Amino acid sequence: MNLTQRPRRLRSDPVRELVGETTLSASDLIAPIFVDATTDERVPIESMPGHDRVPVDESVTRVEEVLATGVQAVIVFGIPRSKDGVGTRAWAEDGVVQDAVRRITAETDATVFTDVCLCEYTDHGHCGPLEDGVEGDGSSTTAAGGNTAAGDEAATGHEVPGARHGQTLTVDNDAAIESLAQIAVSHAEAGAHVVAPSASMDGMVGAIREGLDREGFESVPIMSYAAKYRSAFYGPFRDAADGAPSFGDRRHYQMDPGNAREARREVALDVEQGADVLMVKPALPYLDVIADVRRKFDHPVAAYNVSGEYAMLHAAAENGWLDLEETAYESLLSIKRAGADLILTYFAEDVAERL
Ligand code: PBG
């Protein structure tokens, strides 16, 4: 054999590690946490083993657990004490996220991101007020969809039960972005370091930038969920945060999974409107999109390794079919290799402990 090229030469220790291209570190990771105003004890999230909804009183303890693993950043999601048609509790000064963030920033050194959206705060579960001023009514409009892991898939399409005159009912974009700006300002007032809008509304980043600047928060960055797909991988999250649409689905505002050029367009619009960090969500099924955003833009890129990506590895591991620790690490390393600088992941604590 006259082989001049033997890639295997570099695959033995101690050289292997020195020529490694990608490294993962705890400072790349952001841990999602769920704060619930409707409970005074921790409630395990069944479809996300190891994660709980915690009462506001335990939010600091929860963040201290994260910090103890070496992870320095959290993103806070809230479950409000009540919901209405427009999501009023999302921007309340004494809202669940606002209360938790005030405590966390006062008592810990964590870097605090907040999710800026309305779906957990509206009674119909959509990411903004409905068009035509129609008040949602969670109880009477549950015909399609429902709070299941496959909520999106169960939806019947664009025709929504409860829509008047048989017309399509969807979210009022321009009203939603005003509310989103108000939410972002209320989070910044509570001390959030970075706001992360996830509602997939047109003009949302610009409206938030304007709102923050007007209120003196010009140095609070925006991490935009810029390329956000209508994904069935969000199923477990909707149990965790109680934000499943009570009817219809999110295809009116989130992107179709088959579209990649559209992602570029969405990201470019968010850049124009002042986004500081660009997020792709979900992560593993969209590594091509992460790589594309990395190549096309010079902003930091974040990727959201979502609830379904977490749940499926746990389910397989539970059956003895996969090694959880190895597959979790490989997932995050691959997301990083594809081009993400930051990774939002429910594996943050477990993986950081191993690093
Ligand atoms: C919207 C939001 C969602 C997730 C994060 N922010 C739900 C959705 O878009 O339907 C999902 C995250 C996950 O699945 O882990 N507030």
Image: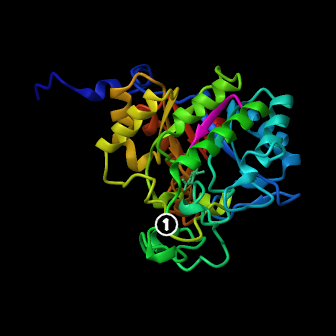
Q: At x 55% / y 80%, what residue is drawn?
A: 143
- Say above or below: 211 vs 326: above
Q: Is residue 103 above or below residue 218?
A: below
- Compared to residue 166, the image places residue 95 above or below, namely above
Name the residue at 52% across, 43% down. 304
Q: Position of residue 78 (x, y in %)?
A: 73, 50
- Please state the horizontal and vertical placement of residue 337, each as a whole percent of the image: 41, 32
> Looking at the image, which residue is at 56% across and 33% down?
223
Query: Based on the displayed image, in which of its 4 quarters is residue 110 positioned?
Result: top right
Residues in magenta? Answer: 191-197
Task: Count numbered badges in the picture.
Answer: 1
* In this rendering, position of residue 293 left or right of residue 82: left
- Residue toward you, 277 or 126: 126
Eyeballing the image, is 29 above or below 15? below
Q: Mark 1 highlights which residue?
A: 169
Residue 237 visible in rendering: yes
